Image: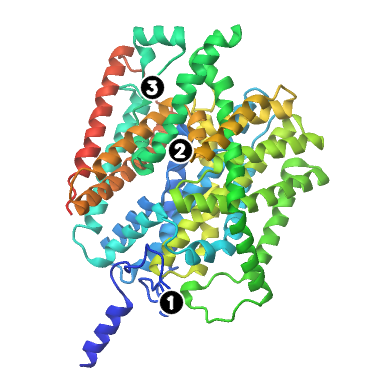
Amino acid sequence: MQNEKELEVNKTIDPTELPENAFRELKDGEEYRPVMHPERNYAEATPYSITMGLLLAVIFSAAAAYLGLKVGQVFEAAIPIAIIAVGLSGALKKKDALGQNVIIQSIGACSGVIVAGAIFTLPALYILQAKYPEISVNFMQIFLSSLLGGILGILFFIPFRKYFVKDMHGKYPFPEATATTQVLISAEGGDKSGNGGQAKTLIIASLIGGIYDYIVATFGWWAETITTTAASWGATIAEKTKVVFSCNTGAALLGLGYIVGLKYAFVIFAGSLFVWWIIIPLLGSYGSAEIAAMDAQSIFSEHARLIGIGGIAMAGIIGIVKSWPIIMQAVGLAGREFKGSAAKTKTVRWQTDLSMKSVVFYIALALVVVFVFFWIGVIGTLWQALVAWIVVTVIAFLFTTVAANAIAIVGSNPVSGMTLMTLIIASAIFVAIGLNGTNGIVASMVIGGVVCTALSMAGGFVTDLKIGYWLGSTPRKQETWKFLGTLVSAATVGGVILVLNKVYGFTGDDALVAPQANAMAKVIEPLMMGGDTPWILYFVGAILALLLNWLGVPALAFCLGMFIPLPLNTPMLVGGAIAYFVAKSSKEESLSKARHERGTLIASGLIAGGALFGVFAAITKFAGFEYTSPLSEGMSQSLGLVAYALLICYLMWDSRRAKA
């Protein structure tokens, strides 16, 4: 009788699926009880979980850095890392694995957020170095910029955790956190088709996507980008009207589009078409003779893209205005806790953060280190370093809620747009205080890297903490070990950027695209070198963002589409359309949902495999291997179209194999 009672208690303590009220708003007096009981202690930060988290942080940092510099989109590593963690714990037959898997995911996910902060800004130094050889870039600048930005992002977000994660329970969808949590909890239910099946599906998709992208990058057996200019009729249209259509055939981008979904993929693609089919033809037909002589790509890079930059900056400002009440509320709560005047309640393990006094101390210490880094390692003049420090502190803190809010609602972090605005503001201030020229360029980009990484980390960290909230992890442990993951990821990213610059470079015909870094360089050069800053184009973009916001169109997504090249946005739409049709493929709702979730798993595999094998391709080229495809342009384009169609068919076919 006693054993039966104990069994019933254990069943109540450790459910094997998320509670019914996990994703909805709570009723008056209702409380959320996570999977791991709030008053029990669990294995979380163990030697196994910490080691695996750090190993995956290194692997995914390298993969995400390559993909981000190639296409301008950094995939979030949380889902594939969670799947790997669940698969490993199942293979090793670990007991009480859930808490450890959360820590593995939390540490490993540092990779994606640190990569986004670094690659959107710091490669701009290499881009401008080709024009101004006196610009110097070293590993320590890249490493410290990423590390300090990541630390500030963690510390600035902790006071907002309770608001976003607990107080707003059920009011934000948290799309990425939802998917990752479902993966982590799937191992607890003992579903034979869940854990092992998911791992197998992910591995197969990763191999297909990886080998596919490796062949294209290394051997060029088919065209990496299919375009209308490859045909004689397309070239004629492009010459006369500047109208071009193109699409990247990579597996990683197709998977990325699937996860983003049709709504935002369509908005991004609409921004691209607005630039490529309206702005560029207008400039080519009615602009100056100099512009008319340019091809469509040159008009995009030199002129049309800058409208998108202005729009991104304004979208960031709109985000701050909308988030101001959230900022004030969280600051007030943190202030009351620091003074000890908050309501005295027993804090259970599940809701225990780092103490507010510790957070304030660490923030002060981190800001001192940032100031010393700016003064000694970047700028060299005390008062100019002080001005730069103030700019970073204010902007990074204000934009923390914008980044977290974006992740909580749509699952994507608009750090590149916010960083562009930071660069414009900071550069104008630096020029006013006499910090310009190549020294001003280095200062602005390194400082931009700190801000960008801080915002990226703040946005990503809300996902980790929401996952922990649903499952019942200890926030203090997630917050503590996140610092170590940040350190390892920052070191990895710094090394990968140096290697990729030597192998591919960021300027020239065969260089990595690095669209965000190129946009940063485009903004910073005229401001610092005394050139003509295209304020009119920025202003037009800002007005466009205001109009889009007024009409209810996601201004940030649209404007991002305006400055990311068309070939990289088209496959996003293709992937989003596949996701839509898979999700609507059956009248039975449970079956359609299962198919869509399997497609998300496959898309994650395509992304991870394509990115990882992209690093292998870089190593292959770095080792000196060169291969020139003997195929003609027409044959290469035709094969590219066929290969891409087969990849699309695979994604749709395998997704539909899911069972309700």
The answer to whether residue 8 shows anywhere in this view is yes
Q: Which mark is residue 73?
A: 2
Q: Give the spatial CA distance, label 2 vs label 1.
A: 43 Å
Residue visible at 51% across and 44% down in the picture: 115
Quadrant assignment for the C terminus: bottom left
Residue 392: % across, % down: 69, 48
* Disc 3 element: strand
- Label 3 packing within 10 angstroms: few (<14), some (14-19), many (20+): some
C-alpha gap between disc 2 and disc 3: 18 Å
Name the residue nearer the viewer: 544 or 505. 544
Q: Quadrant of the N terminus?
A: bottom left
Going by the image, does 590 lie left or right of 320?
A: left
x 72%, y 30%: residue: 438
Mark 2: amino acid: Gln
Q: Which residue is mark 1?
A: 29
Res. 514 mark = none
Amino acid tagged 1: Gly
Q: Name the residue: 64% across, 60% down.
A: 328
Asked whether the residues under the numbered discs 2 and 1 touch, taking CB atoms below 8 Å apart as contact, a structural biologist would say: no
Query: Please, is residue 314 above or below residue 349 in the view?
Result: above
Q: Would residue 488 be visible to someone looking at this image?
A: no
Residue at x-position 35% and y-position 54%: 179
Vertical placement of 657 versus 14: above or below? above
Residue 593 image point, x, y percent: 25, 51
In the foreground, 170 or 637: 170
Of 413 and 30, which appears nearest the observer? 30
**Horizontal and vertical percent for residue 527?**
71, 29
Mark closest to the chain's N terminus, 2 or 1: 1
Indicate which disc, 2 or 3, sits on the residue closer to the N terminus: 2
Q: Secondary structure at mark 2?
A: loop
Q: What number is the disc on residue 246?
A: 3
For label 1, the SS is loop
